[in-house]
């Protein structure tokens, strides 16, 4: 589904990625792990079309990606979810994306109601998003992505700052989405929360390169120890 071949990205004052190569298959759940500043968020921004590689090749479904199409096919929940919430109510937030797609209002309403049911957002539906707790904002941000019905869902450090109850709820929801065939990509420093969610782990190092790629059920003791130290 996604393939990076010697992809690099350079910001104005620093290297983001340095010649990384890996692939992600449709329907997989994959974690991108590594130390702070290793390039995890840069990978996600490339995957969803917010950035373009400065070197190397990035393929989406075996073709050069149409970056406008990527923004419809790949949903991205930012680490700080409040930056992507800007509507007056949670219901309006959930409806915003489908309306931008030009869907009939009946379809928009159906999608919003389905996501409210899935995420148990009934009590929040008329609330102002920026007045919600961090956990509630994370769920609303995820909901605003899900109403677009993307093939791939990306979550950047989804557990940061969340109460345990919201972490457990988010894990349950992501497991359901994976079981229904969605491609799930997460970044996290929490080895114990992340590994039950994913099929494989792509690990970056401090040089902004791929350290190793491994199936979670085939991790060596050395790899586990390295991931636990992140």
Image (cartoon, rainbow, N blue to C red):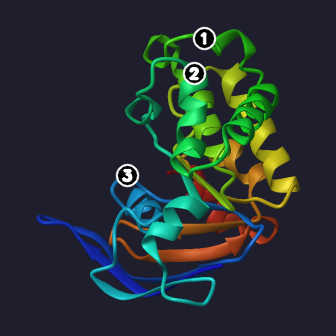
Going from N to C along the chain, the mark reached first, 1 or 2, is: 2
Residue position for label 3: 36
Q: Is residue 26 left or right of residue 21?
A: right
Write the residue at 80% across / 55% down: 178
Write the residue at 56% across / 52% down: 101
Asked whether the viewer can see residue 99, the reply is: yes
Residue position for label 1: 126
Alpha carbon separation for disc pair 2 and 3: 32 Å
Q: Quadrant of residue 168?
A: top right
Alpha carbon separation for disc pair 1 and 2: 6 Å
Pinpoint residue 103: horizontal percent, then vertical percent.
64, 48
Alpha carbon separation for disc pair 3 and 1: 37 Å
Vertical placement of 228 versus 59: above or below? above
Vertical placement of 114 versus 68: above or below? above
At label 1, counting other C-alpha atoms closer than 10 Å, the crowd grade (few under 14, some 14-19, many 20 or more) is few
At label 2, counting other C-alpha atoms closer than 10 Å, the crowd grade (few under 14, some 14-19, many 20 or more) is many
Asked whether the viewer can see residue 204, the reply is: no
Going from N to C along the chain, the mark reached first, 3 or 1, is: 3
Quadrant in the picture for the N terminus: bottom right
Going from N to C along the chain, the mark reached first, 2 or 3, is: 3
Q: Total marks drawn?
A: 3
Pinpoint residue 135: horizontal percent, then vertical percent.
58, 22
Pick out the residue farthest to the right. 179
Q: Nearer the viewer, mark 2 or mark 3?
A: 2
Write the residue at 52% across / 69% down: 69
Pick out the residue farthest to the left. 13
Pinpoint residue 219: horizontal percent, then vertical percent.
73, 68
Contact between marks 1 and 2 (CB within 8 A): the answer is yes
Quick one: SS at disc 3?
loop
Quick one: SS at disc 2?
helix
At label 3, counting other C-alpha atoms closer than 10 Å, the crowd grade (few under 14, some 14-19, many 20 or more) is few
Mark number displayed over residue 90: 2
């Amino acid at each position: 589904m996604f393939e990076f071949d010697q992809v690099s990205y350079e910001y104005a004052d620093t290297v983001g990625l340095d010649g990384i190569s890996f692939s992600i298959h449709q329907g997989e759940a994959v974690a991108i792990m590594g130390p702070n500043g290793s390039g995890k968020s840069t990978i996600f921004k490339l995957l969803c079309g917010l950035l373009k590689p400065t070197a190397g090749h990035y393929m989406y479904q075996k073709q050069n990606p149409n970056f406008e199409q990527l923004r419809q096919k790949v949903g991205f929940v930012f680490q700080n979810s409040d930056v992507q919430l800007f509507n007056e109510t949670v219901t309006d937030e959930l409806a915003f994306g489908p309306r931008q797609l030009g869907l009939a209002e009946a379809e928009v309403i159906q999608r919003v109601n389905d996501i409210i049911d899935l995420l148990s957002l009934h009590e929040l539906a008329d609330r102002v998003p920026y007045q919600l707790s961090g956990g509630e904002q994370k769920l609303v941000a995820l909901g605003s992505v899900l109403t677009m019905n993307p093939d791939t869902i990306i979550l950047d450090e989804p557990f940061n700052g969340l109460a345990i109850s919201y972490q457990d709820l988010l894990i349950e929801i992501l497991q359901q989405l994976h079981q229904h065939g969605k491609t799930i990509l997460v970044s996290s420093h929490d080895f114990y929360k992340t590994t039950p969610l994913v099929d494989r782990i792509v690990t970056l190092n401090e040089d902004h390169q791929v350290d190793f790629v491994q199936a979670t059920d085939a991790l060596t003791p050395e790899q586990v120890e390295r991931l636990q130290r992140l």
